[in-house]
Image: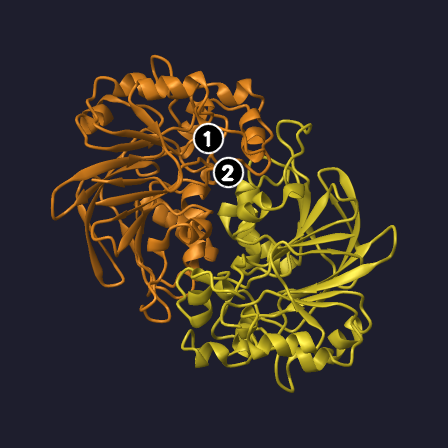
Chain colours: A orange, B yellow
Amino acid sequence: MRIRVLGSGAGGGFPQWNCNCANCRAVRAGAPGFLPRTQSSLAVSANGDDWLLLNASPDLREQIAAAPELSPRRDDPVRASPIKAVALTNGDVDHVAGLLNLREAQPFSIYAARRVIDALAANPIFSILQPQLVPHIELPMDAPTPVNGAGVDLGLKLRAFPVPGKIALYLEDKNAPNFGTSVGDTLGLEIIEMATGKSFFYVPGCAQVDAPLAARLRNAALVFFDGTLFEEEEMIKQGLMGKTGSRMGHVNMSGDDGSLAAFAPLGVKRKIYVHINNSNPVLDEHSSAYATVQAAGWEVGEDGMEVSL
Amino acid sequence: MRIRVLGSGAGGGFPQWNCNCANCRAVRAGAPGFLPRTQSSLAVSANGDDWLLLNASPDLREQIAAAPELSPRRDDPVRASPIKAVALTNGDVDHVAGLLNLREAQPFSIYAARRVIDALAANPIFSILQPQLVPHIELPMDAPTPVNGAGVDLGLKLRAFPVPGKIALYLEDKNAPNFGTSVGDTLGLEIIEMATGKSFFYVPGCAQVDAPLAARLRNAALVFFDGTLFEEEEMIKQGLMGKTGSRMGHVNMSGDDGSLAAFAPLGVKRKIYVHINNSNPVLDEHSSAYATVQAAGWEVGEDGMEVSL
């Protein structure tokens, strides 16, 4: 399996258009140790020719342009794409807006939870993807689903599972418990290569590493995990926004309740943080936070990173 | 007035993600005479500090990153943006999807026709822009409207006027005349600098240069105009799509009914094509089409082009 990190940033990317925090100022100035990052998406292929996207970020056009394997080959028909399917982990803007880049009458399949399919259907702008060309396929919970698109079998299965999280910001109901969040609003995905049985996990949004999630990830070969925040209150401390990580549905890296501690006993062979927010000190390769996650055996995801499994 | 072409391409940009036409193959290969182009947008400023965007393309994050004047200054507050307002000429994906890049609780104003404001309101995803921070202001027809945003007077006025065109693709009603198109679905804009009275025109989508439009543009100092297609049937001839320019709401450049002929007697001082589709032969600087438009006194818009007026 080939995996490419298309975008390793969280919503807004790095730098974020309206952010003037120390990290964003540094990356804009080209300071050493700071890499620009586009928004959250991975691409996966079993055969190197046909690709499944994991989330469709608003930066998708730029991400495709940076990845030669995602453009038509010279001898392809006049309209063609190696992108045959897109799987969505939630309905957040940073994970679904890129679908609008996949217009122009090209067939592919969308895999998502029923809640996310319904959220897309409630927005007429997404009808730019014609239903007869772009089927929306519901991902059942915990049942491996073969991935097909544009008449091609991708040789991959998706096993979707709910993780602690939050409904998309634009769908929040201020009067409902946890803003109206329900099962299916935040998924983790296990991506399984059918020929070999190898698999990896993709969990870009997760509010807590609870016992069921820890059990599922134990001894995994590879996990891409929510790296939004280093600290629960870093957005507030930096004066960026009055929300904690919990309020946004993202577990922090550090601390007793953080992902570093939660993963320590799990024996995961390769651990890569993605969906990294511009406020996170790990975006500075010279920071103590970066040293901490490296010492704990984690990698900080970068755009264009390629992983083979 | 300072004007920056953020994106000179039509919907899909150049290259387009799923297009393997001769132009797209050439620009992907880095062939001489072919420049990549992002999707359709301009930025305008009277004072060089506060900016009005004309349309918000899906490539807006990349476009902002390429234009230092559109990012916060080093001594700005921790959240800030020089972008104070966005004016929309229609509801097409290539002109409105970029609004989703302007989330993150930043105040600015949106100016658009009532029809386009209603189209946005019908899509809950755009509620990510909180109404109390991002007012939607209706552009009246043919009445100069001062541009304000985030409490700043931009020193500009917008005069909106209807031009021949078509409703956004995702809003088409197959059973209605001209797919349900009505007044306000396609605007031209005159942007007026209040301090000097200087003005220019921006008409990125237009199905026909009719007599009222010709009269309005006569002797203008500067016009950015719809450069989608060179020929009415070029999409069909190249096997890209079964639609004529007329069907898409875009006048061709060439021929008796084209924009080259229509502008010839108008005395416009500077004429720049924007919204140029990947199929258009003018994207090859060595083509006879390019030579033709140059000989007629037109410029072919490029990303990053700056114009002062």
Quadrant housing residue A100: bottom left
Q: Dot 2, how many residues are within 10 Å of its Cα: few (below 14), some (14-19), or many (20+)?
A: many
Q: CA distance from mark 2 to mark 1?
A: 8 Å
- Under circle 1, the secondary element is loop
Name the residue type under label 1.
Answer: Asn
| Residue at the extreme right of the image, as rendered | B196
In percent of width and height, residue A282 lies at 43, 24
Relative to B268, B54 lies left or right: left
Which residue is more in the foreground, B162 or B32? Answer: B32
Residue at 51% across / 60% down in the picture? Answer: B13
Name the residue type under label 2.
Answer: Gly
Q: Report if the CB atoms under discs 2 and 1 are less than 8 Å apart.
A: yes
| Residue at the extreme top of the image, as rendered | A256
Q: Chain of mark 1?
A: A
Q: Chain of mark 2?
A: A
Which residue is more in the foreground, A149 or B186? Answer: A149
| Residue at the extreme left of the image, as rendered | A196
In percent of width and height, residue B83 lies at 67, 43
Q: Quick one: quadrant of the N terminus of chain A?
A: top left
Marked residue nearer the N-terminal end (2 or 1) = 2
Q: Which residue is mark 1?
A: A277
